[in-house]
Image (spheres, rainbow, N blue to C red):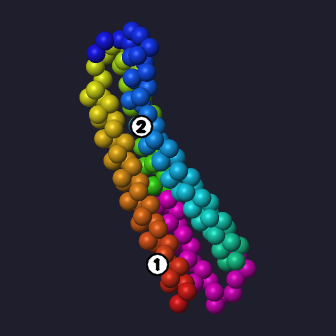
Amino acid sequence: MFPLTNLTDVTHLIQLAIAPVFLLNAVASIIGVLINRLSRAVDRIRVLDERLSRAGPGTEARDEMELQVLRRRLWLIYLALTCEVLCALFVGLLIAAGFVGAVLGANVSLGIACLFVFAMAAFIVGLTVFLREIFLAVVSTRDRMR
């Protein structure tokens, strides 16, 4: 691979970087949803903590069970967020490596391929953990309604 020598080379490189940018957009959307769910869980924990500090013996056990579920959900959301942020970092590194490799004329194709595989693995694991958190939220809500 030769260093960038003209505007056509730069234009082609930018075109190649567009697809990972769409992936970054998707990951950013998922991160936004996860942060919203994290905020709601934290708010609910605060309400339950306040209620438990004033509660009588009748409602304490149910609130403690709900707190345990919320703690588990918080951990899952945190794990999913970590995976999605790692995915975004890998994609950012992938784009940067492509530009640096092109400018320096270095063959970085193996590094870019590895970064893409790592990004996809983090993306998939993050979505899987997110799905688990959704299942836990639905089951716990269904149990509370009974």
Task: Tell me which amino acid carries mark 2.
Answer: Pro
The residue labelled by disc 1 is 139
Which stretch appears magenta? 53-77
Task: Tell me which amino acid carries mark 1.
Answer: Val
Quarter of image, res 20: top left
* Residue 97 visible in this rendered orientation of the protein: no
Res. 10 mark: none
In this view, the residue in front, 79 or 8, is: 8
Query: Residue 105 location, x and y as percent?
Result: 33, 13
Q: Label 1 crowding class (10 Å Cα cut-off): few <14, some 14-19, many 20+?
A: few
Q: Residue at x 33, y 47 (%)?
A: 121
Q: Is residue 4 left or right of residue 44?
A: left
Q: Residue furthest left?
A: 110
The residue labelled by disc 2 is 20
Query: Residue 99 location, x and y as percent?
Result: 41, 22
Rendered view: 76 above or below 20: below
Q: Mark 2 or mark 1: which is in front?
A: 2
Query: Residue 8 location, x and y as percent?
Result: 40, 16
Quarter of image, res 51: bottom right
Q: Is residue 50 left or right of residue 127?
A: right
- Local SS, label 1: helix
- Please name the predominant secondary structure of the magenta segment in the image: helix
Query: Residue 31 location, x and y as percent?
Result: 52, 51
Q: Residue at x 53, y 90 (%)?
A: 146
- Local SS, label 2: helix
Q: Residue at x 57, y 62 (%)?
A: 37
Disc 2 and disc 1: Cα gap in Å?
A: 35 Å
* Residue 16 visible in this rendered orientation of the protein: yes
Q: Label 2 crowding class (10 Å Cα cut-off): few <14, some 14-19, many 20+?
A: some
Q: Earlier in the sequence, mark 2 or mark 1?
A: 2
Report the quarter where the N terminus lies.
top left
